[in-house]
Image: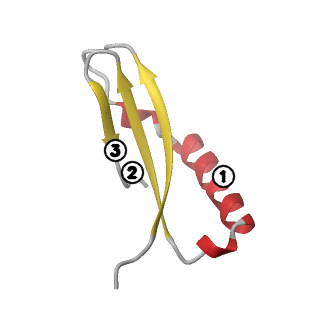
Amino acid sequence: MKEEVLYFSEVKFWKEFEFFDPRFTFNLAKQTKMRKAAKGFLAENLSFQNHFVSFCLVSVNEKKGCKYYLDLF
């Protein structure tokens, strides 16, 4: 049986940086904030409580387009 997944995503835009990995923006404070938001959403939407929760980042770059980082935490 395939498990249902509920994705919580953050979309960020950055100008071109040569040595920058957007995943570093997901520090402990950001993770705590996103988990709290997910917990609140699940408390209000009981039909999603049995779903697996995944936290993702969409990085938008003016030269490279979009890059998706799935299942970060």
Q: CA distance from mark 3 to mark 1?
A: 19 Å
The residue indicated by pointer 3 is: 69
On the image, which quarter does residue 45 sit in?
bottom right
Could you say whether the residue bearing mark 2 is in a helix, strand or loop?
loop
Sort mark 2 into few (<14), some (14-19) or many (20+) by Cα contacts within 10 Å. few
Sort mark 3 into few (<14), some (14-19) or many (20+) by Cα contacts within 10 Å. some
Q: Amino acid at mark 1?
A: Ala
Sort mark 1 into few (<14), some (14-19) or many (20+) by Cα contacts within 10 Å. few
Q: Amino acid at mark 2?
A: Leu
Of marks 3 and 1, which one's residue comes earlier in the chain?
Answer: 1
Could you say whether the residue bearing mark 3 is in a helix, strand or loop?
strand
Is the residue under label 1 in contact with that under label 3 (CB below 8 Å)? no
Q: Is residue 5 left or right of residue 61?
A: right
Residue 20 placed where, x, y %?
Answer: 31, 23
Q: Quadrant of the C terminus?
A: bottom left
Residue 13 placed where, x, y %?
Answer: 44, 23
Residue 14 placed where, x, y %?
Answer: 41, 19
Residue furthest out toward the right: 44
Q: Quadrant of the N terminus?
A: bottom left
Q: Residue at x 40, y 37 (%)?
A: 58
Is the residue under label 1 in contact with that under label 2 (CB below 8 Å)? no
Q: Residue at x 72, y 67 (%)?
A: 43
**Residue 72 numbered mark, or none:** 2
Q: Is residue 40 left or right of residue 73?
A: right
Q: CA distance from mark 3 to mark 2?
A: 7 Å
**Residue 4 numbered mark, or none:** none
Could you say whether the residue bearing mark 1 is in a helix, strand or loop?
helix
Of marks 2 and 1, which one's residue comes earlier in the chain?
Answer: 1
Q: Residue at x 66, y 66 (%)?
A: 42
**Residue 37 numbered mark, or none:** 1
Q: Is residue 65 above or below residue 30?
A: above
Residue furthest out toward the bottom: 1
